[in-house]
Image: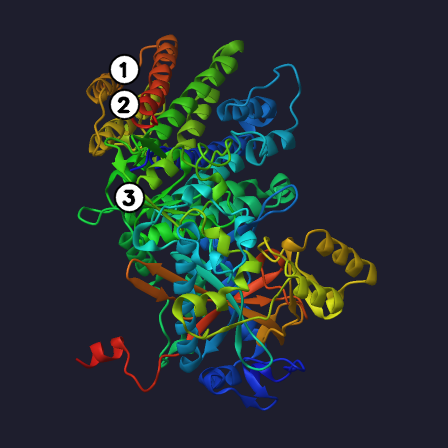
Amino acid sequence: MLVRIAESLYWTGRYIKRAMYLAKFLRVQYFSTLDASMALNIEFTLRSILNMSGITQDSEKELNEQEVLVKVGFDIDNPASILSTIVAARENTRALRHVLSSEVWESTNVMYHFAKNYSVDYYKQRGLYEFTTKVEENVKIIRSNIHSTMLRTDEYYFLMLGSWLEETIQILRILRSKMYDMEVLSQGGENIPLMQYQWTITLKSLESFDMHNKFYHHTTSTQSVVEFLISNPKFPRSLYYNISHLIRDLRKISVQPRGFNDFIFDLEKMQSDVKFFTYTNNDDLHDFLEELMKRVSSIHDVCTSLYFNKE
Amino acid sequence: MDGLFSKYDLKPNCYDEVFADHNTYRSEYHLIRDLVSKMDVPTFKSLNEEAKLSFLNQGITYALYASNETKETIFPFDLMPRIISSSDWQKLEQGMIQRNTALNLFIHDVYNDAKILKDKVVPKELILSSKHYIKLMEGFSPKGKIYCHICGTDLIRHSDGNFYILEDNLRSPSGVSYVLSNRVTLSRTLPQMFQGKMIHPVGQYPKELLKTLKSVSPQADQEITCVLLTPGQYNSAYYEHSILAKFMGIELVEGSDLFVKNDIVYMNSIGRKRKVDVIYRRIDDNFLDPDVFKKDSMLGVKGVMAAYLKGNVTIVNAPGTGISDDKAVCAYVPDMIQYYLDEDPIIDNVPTYICEKPQDLKYTLEHIESLVVKPVDMSGGYGVAIMDTLSKEEVEKIKQQIMASPRDYIAQPKMMLSTHVTYIEETERFEPRHVDLRTFTLMGKDQSYVLPGGLSRVALKRNSLIVNSSQGGGSKDTWVMMNPTFPSQSQSQTQS
């Protein structure tokens, strides 16, 4: 397989997952502000949304709600917006349409045309729910097409490599930005109901609310939420689950370049650190997440040097 | 006329492909008569919308070279097919093979013994002054002596009912992907139209193309690796590049995916680097190799010409083939057919006045009002001037331009392209629109193939004669009917 194609597949996997998480996070966060306990905190939520999207912000300046929503959703000059991510996913699949099944290409193209033609005015007024839900649905169709129509060959595994890595990063980002939110919220003393509400939103952002409650029999605490999302081996939105699958699919790529074994060794170390994580206090959790983020981010660099180098 | 076509007006002095006169369908169109007489316009309209959405979602689009921003556009597709009878087709097919045989002999001759130039059948200056002439190719003979492996020839049907050749595209003719997708889209949208009809399939083109590429590989004994070299996904024909690569099952590469080491071309693949035998390139000569041509080309492959001239890789079409792409040279093809094959041309050229020839220049200037003037070296319908549509000042200006550099122009009589029933969205009616036909001819070592039918391009603007997609053209599925007297291969297979 061409180096360029492998790299494009990897990025396609990443962008498709990213589009879904950006849409999901935006929707759940935004609608949480309509709830009484957060009603006075719209500014706070907008900052949290910007934070999660990785958009740098001026902390002094007052935020305009519609501006933030457009920036996160539709600003094509902002590479972290949902639209930019969808455009990037589609540009990559366009370069790959001869190696992908036409179902994967077509469903990505359908999502692109949907997002590109969506009225920004309507989105600002009433369309946020519809837009973000449709983006998620589209991503689910694409993923289903990837799973059901692609051969299990290197093409598929490079897509999945990007997909698992992006999911790991997104879960980490959500956890980190929620930790940050908690710190801000507890500045005036700890407010248990508000904290619980924030964890509920977090779980909902990750479509984890029901399964969490099932697993922990309806008790929500910081410990239950973070352990569920970090180390649960059976839940597909946990870090452990994603890192394990990343390792599994990486091993299936037919080419094992020099340095491969060291890479796997580091990944397995990370996998085991995540597996045996237990919550003790917020400070330790904070350090753990920061350290893990650095290690996860380096996966991309190693992939680049192992697979994506050209003559 | 009944049903869908009840309000159809024939255009005077034009050959209409569908109707012989107001009440009579031409014989091959009896095939669809039943269907169209039972259908109404609203039904057709919704089918038309369906087809458009299908094109958009499949990403069957092209980019327009607009001034500031490239816009992705669906190539307009008309659901009413163009039908070519088997006898017309037989003649066209033979004509194309004859023509391409002569063209390949000509290019080989030019770069080797140059006999035809010495014998003054084709003027030496015309060829040597071509900007597509590549000195490096002198004395080199590519595999099978084939230069033009893929040729797109544009034909029109004049009011006399005969086909004439307008021009040959020998560099990187495009449009074949539309032939393939038009057929798929039409059969999805109007399956009833195909039932019980013996239409030549078009889907085997990629297979034939791959066979052609493999036939000219430098070595035949081992596994042959062919690649399709594209300028990248922002090129207007990228869709075509990707669909052809996909159907052929070969890698679609950009310049940076290839590199040359010791005059061997390799692919930048993960793991072991793979050697490349045949490059089907969709970039112009100029961009092919920064060592030899444009130094700042980012699209090409450094060192690929050296590898080619050593015989380690085959480039398709061969570099320098463009000398025959020139519209003035096109006018000499009938002479080439006589010279090399000692045959009369099966399909005539549109009469062409080569402004470089003093007597032709004189004729052109004297009769300019009734002519169409074309720059010899532009494609995509750019620069074509139809004189009777221009003001006196504009005509005068073109006269001056021709006199200043006669080598750059040819003139042709205004040929009345035939018309075809075409659905016009604005009026929600069927109206006559001018059509041409681009055929696709493949030539490999000891093999040739003409894609049955080809691309019928439609000038969607009323009265326009310019069919190019960049200037408001669309296309139609083109059917070639199988010869009813000879059972086709698929028929005999079913019987056994």
Say if residue B73 shows up in the picture. Answer: no
Q: For residue B277, which numbered disc appears in the image?
A: 3
User: Which residue corresponds to mark 1?
Assistant: A278
Is residue A193 visible to us here?
A: yes
Residue at 16 percent across and 80 percent down: it is: B496
Q: Which of the 4 image quadrants contains residue B413? A: bottom right
Q: Amino acid at mark 3?
A: Asp
- In the picture, the quarter occupied by the N terminus of chain A is top left
Looking at the image, do the residues carrying marks 2 and 1 touch, with CB atoms under 8 Å apart? yes
Q: Nearer the viewer, residue B412 or A209?
A: B412
Task: Say what amino acid the circle numbered 2 marks.
Answer: Ser
Q: Residues within 10 Å of mark 3 (few under 14, many from 20)?
A: many
- Look at the picture and state if B364 lies above or below A122: below
Q: Position of residue B476 (x, y in %)?
A: 50, 68
* Secondary structure under the numbered disc 3 in the rendered image: loop
**Tag 1's secondary structure?**
loop
Say which residue label 2 marks: A231
User: For the residues marked 2 and 1, what is the alpha-carbon distance in whole angstroms?
Assistant: 8 Å
Of residue B349 and residue B283, the one placed in the foreground of this image is B349
B115 sits to left or right of B395:
left
- Mark closer to the observer (3, 1): 3
| Residue at 27% in and 49% down | B217
